[in-house]
Image (spheres, grey):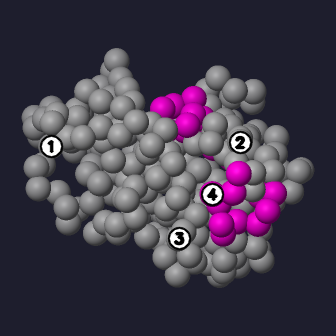
Amino acid sequence: LMPSFQNFPTGFRAVVFGSSGGIGREMFNILEVEPACGEVAGFSRSTVPAFDLQDEASIEQAVASIAAKGPVHLLVDATGLLHDGQMQPEKSISAVDPQLIARSFAVNATGPLLLLKHFHHLMPRHERSAFATISARVGSIEDNRLGGWYGYRASKAALNMFLKTASIEIARKRPLAVCLALHPGTVETPLSAPFAGDRTLLSANKAARLLLDVIDSADSGSSGSFFAYDGQEIAW
């Protein structure tokens, strides 16, 4: 079985945040059997230690639990919030609720930034490494043609800005690091399936494999970029 990862060091270490979600679970499972991957750790609300994007102390505990083992070459943030029992994406401006907007930002933008805040120092200085966060095409300002979904769109646009900004800082000390925002497509998961309409649905496994291929093939020159699952760059 040939490693599908061509551009990471042999025996590389990986961490998946949101490893109980649709895409995150598939990424974790793929990495667990990947010959080139020496170790993968997964974190979610149900792992030990448990991790919650809205609880910075839990992120610090997750870091502490793996920091002693050495550098981490691949950090994947597969978290995200579009809807749940408390909130639905806004169809119009009259549905905007500032508390729900704040919650969208806390989970979709600030949370991933806190992951980078606490984890970037575990990325090796002189080996290839990657941080990838699941963004969304609807976070593209240029691509916005339908309107609606105020909180989700704006929080993903903010995530993209955080990612771009962090990529510049990280490159100064880690020139081989790649920071990517990724659009997974419309995936058969509880997050996006209710809103699929007539779009083609990708299985979570297929989306995870495609996204991992994009991460592996991206070079440091494309750090701070926004890619779709098919490798096409998306306008900010």
Spatial distance from mark 4 to mark 1, Cα to Cα? 39 Å
The kind of residue tagged 3 is: Ala
Residue that label 4 marks: 4
Q: Secondary structure at mark 2?
A: helix
In the image, which is nearer the foreground, mark 4 or mark 1? Answer: 4
Q: Choose the circle earlier in sequence order: 1 or 3.
A: 1
Residue that label 1 marks: 148
* Picture coordinates of residue 133, whole percent (x, y): 50, 53
Q: Quadrant of the C terminus?
A: bottom left
* Circle on res. 169: none
The kind of residue tagged 1 is: Gly
Residue that label 3 marks: 218
* Circle on res. 33: 2
Spatial distance from mark 1 to mark 3, Cα to Cα? 32 Å
- In the figure, is residue 169 to the left or right of 92? right
> Do labels 4 and 1 touch, CB within 8 Å?
no
Residue occupying the far right of the picture: 68
Q: Is residue 56 magenta?
A: no
**Are there few (<14), some (14-19), or many (20+) residues within 10 Å of tag 4?**
few
> Do labels 4 and 3 touch, CB within 8 Å?
no
* Picture coordinates of residue 41, whole percent (x, y): 73, 41
The kind of residue tagged 2 is: Val
Residue 149: quarter of image: top left
Q: Secondary structure at mark 1?
A: loop
Q: Residue at x 65, y 66 (%)?
A: 6
